[in-house]
Amino acid sequence: MTDKRKVRKAVFPVAGLGTRFLPATKAVPKEMLTVVDKPVIQYVVDEALDAGIEHLIFVTGRNKGVIEDYFDIQTELEQTLKERNKNAELTLLAEILPKAGTTSFTRQQAPLGLGHAVWCARDIVGDEPFAVLLPDMIMRSEKGCLKGMVELYEQSGGNVLAVEECAPEQAHKYGIVGVGDAVGDGFKITAMVEKPPAGTAPSNFFINGRYILQPEIFGILETQERGAGNEIQLTDGMLKLAKQQQFAGYHFRGETYDCGMKEGFILANVAFALSRGDIRPGVEDQLKALMAALK
Ligand code: UTP
């Protein structure tokens, strides 16, 4: 049966070690690094809220307490802002504060892999479909990526993965899907291959870090053996679920910045700064000058 219950909850796995960003991530979670003036995680939470998500579930780990603080009130700061009549700043803080009771935090005690991190959210998600958003990936597009996925899910039910096109010669770096018949505005996923050897990829559509999954994934992840990198892999669990349930692909057409990588993080800062009327004038000419000096 195709399950089309509303997608109300989103899981943000934020328990990874962020080794590619050391030494910064020794004390600051990579999700709290700022793109212009907001932490990376805020962009991803905004995408989820825009898609109608009502409950945010963070799977955290050691050294990630600051993420919990970020989504709470900061009484002393707000008092000081009030005393100084900093009303714009107070409004800004009020706007990003999630409604009471709409956030949950659970801990992944050891970084055993993305599949294990998602499984740690099982009791909070319960028996309903849910979204997973990899918090390193910031998407930019007219329609939010998860919003488009929810629209497809309303047509297709089952599980939905967002995919993007890569150059065929880059396919070995990604989780690649096989493309089948149309399902609503998307397509049926016929295969999922993690980092296919060169020349063997079933397509050039890669899984970009946004998922809508049915709760049956939890039972599978519970017994999932360790896979690549000796970690419990979400893809391995999805492959098993795909034997019982449909997976549809949503072709996301927009920009994606992988902020778990230095290059992606820097590009995100430049792109978002240039799209902001208050920042662009201060950086555009100097960026051009820097580029010209490179030639
Ligand atoms: P990454 O592969 O980016 O791993 O995980 P990482 O540890 O965060 O970063 P590097 O490679 O050491 O620099 C993809 C997503 O899965 C989460 C991460 O937080 C990230 O959002 N994750 C990964 C967990 O929550 N737990 C894990 O055990 C592994």
Image: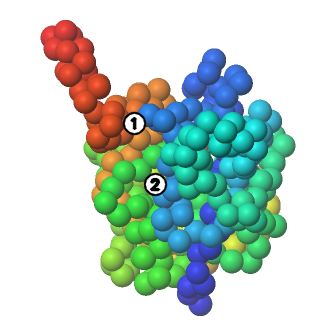
Q: Is residue 204 above or below residue 4?
A: above
Residue toward you, 208 or 60: 60
Quadrant assignment for the C terminus: top left
Left-right relation of 36 to 275? right
Q: Can residue 93 be seen in this view?
A: yes
Task: Find residue 55 and report its image quarter.
Answer: bottom right
The residue located at (79%, 47%) in the rendering is 108
Residue at which label 1 appears: 268
Left-right relation of 266 to 234? left
Tell me where residue 244 appears, x and y as whole percent.
Answer: 61, 78
The residue located at (25%, 30%) in the rendering is 281
Q: Distance between the residues labelled 2 and 1?
A: 19 Å
Mark 2 or 1, nearer chain start:
2
Circle 2 sits in a helix, a strand or a loop, which is it? strand
Tell me where residue 291 appears, x and y as whole percent.
Answer: 21, 17
Residue at which label 2 appears: 207
The residue located at (81%, 67%) in the rendering is 123
Circle 1 sits in a helix, a strand or a loop, which is it? helix
- Which amino acid type corresponds to the residue marked 1 in the rendered image? Ala
Q: Can residue 233 be seen in this view?
A: no
Residue toward you, 295 or 66: 66
Left-right relation of 247 to 15? left
